[in-house]
Amino acid sequence: MEVTFLGTSSAVPSKMRNHTSIALRIPGEVFLFDCGEGTQRQMALAGISPIKVTRIFITHLHGDHILGIPGMIQSMGFRGREEPLELYGPPGTLEVYESMMKVGYFSLDFEIQVNEITEGVVVEEDEYLVSCARGSHSVTNLAYCFQEKKRPRFLREKAIALGLKPGPDFGRLHRGIPVRVGDRVIMPEEVLGEPRRGVKICYSGDTRPCESIVKLARGADLLIHESTFEAGKKDKAAESGHSTAAEAARVARDAEVRRLILTHLSTRYRRSEVLEEAAREIFPETVVAEDLMTLEVNAVEPHDDG
Ligand SMILES: [Zn+2]
Ligand SMILES: [Zn+2]
């Protein structure tokens, strides 16, 4: 799966950094995490179709994270979208959404479901889970975690040895359904290997470093954490409800994630290397996000036998 940074600025955009939005591409779907102003234009540059967006997850209701929603929805209407769209956000999202739907004249032929959420699992499908936890910002902020579910490996040779033929029965057993061969019933556990780990990706939204995010991100393949300020601006970060690069790095270290990406950068930092270096002293696997940067994210499987 792929993560694309559509915008990486904090409250004010710059020539090089658009307002915040992150696209997650999984098979058959695109999720957006936040949707700052101009996100649809960034998607065009990244080659991601807004029609494929099935869910938008909003961390909080500050303008730099939501003002791209009305324009994007109106464009979806122009393109004749019919598929429903799910919108998730903290309490207050419905009221903000209703105001956005009064901006200008337009018509929509698709359904938009608004889900106000607080914490815990917010989406569960056969292939993945999305959960959220409270961060610590000047307004309610939700950090999100996407976790892929992976079925155990299917032991093909063993299945054949038990008299099964490759085909639909393999799929049934892999999904946990017993299958009859002659007068014998084959149970799924006879042909399934060790459970496998799926990809885990966590995104902080705007926040002070906090324990709830360390917990949510535990062992993630990728943590995307805000880093509005450099280390010398610790007091400024604290009073505005944001994090420094070093603070974000400590969250990554404490959560034992594999990689850290810093985003939501103040436009005052023209040289993002300063933030990157400060974070790497604490957590070496750190990169500062740039607009339109795309990463492929895979889970490490220590006992992968192919
Ligand atoms: Zn922000
Ligand atoms: Zn904010």
Image (cartoon, helix red, strand yellow):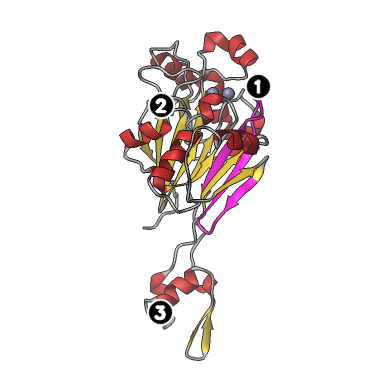
Of the two numbered discs 1 and 3 in the rendering, the one whose residue sits closer to the viewer: 1
The one nearer the camera, 61 or 191, is: 61
Residue type at numbered disc 1: Ser
Q: Which residue is mark 2?
A: 289
Q: Which residues are magenta?
A: 121-147
Disc 3 to disc 2, C-alpha distance: 50 Å
Disc 2 to disc 1, C-alpha distance: 24 Å
SS type, badge 2: loop
Which residue is located at x 60 percent, y 29 percent? 61
Q: Which residue is mark 1?
A: 138
SS type, badge 1: loop
SS type, badge 3: helix
Question: In terms of sequence position, does the residue under pointer 1 or pointer 3 come before the other?
Answer: 1
Disc 1 to disc 3, C-alpha distance: 61 Å
Classify residue 270 as left or right of residue 221. left
Classify residue 181 as left or right of residue 134. left
Q: Which mark is residue 161?
A: 3
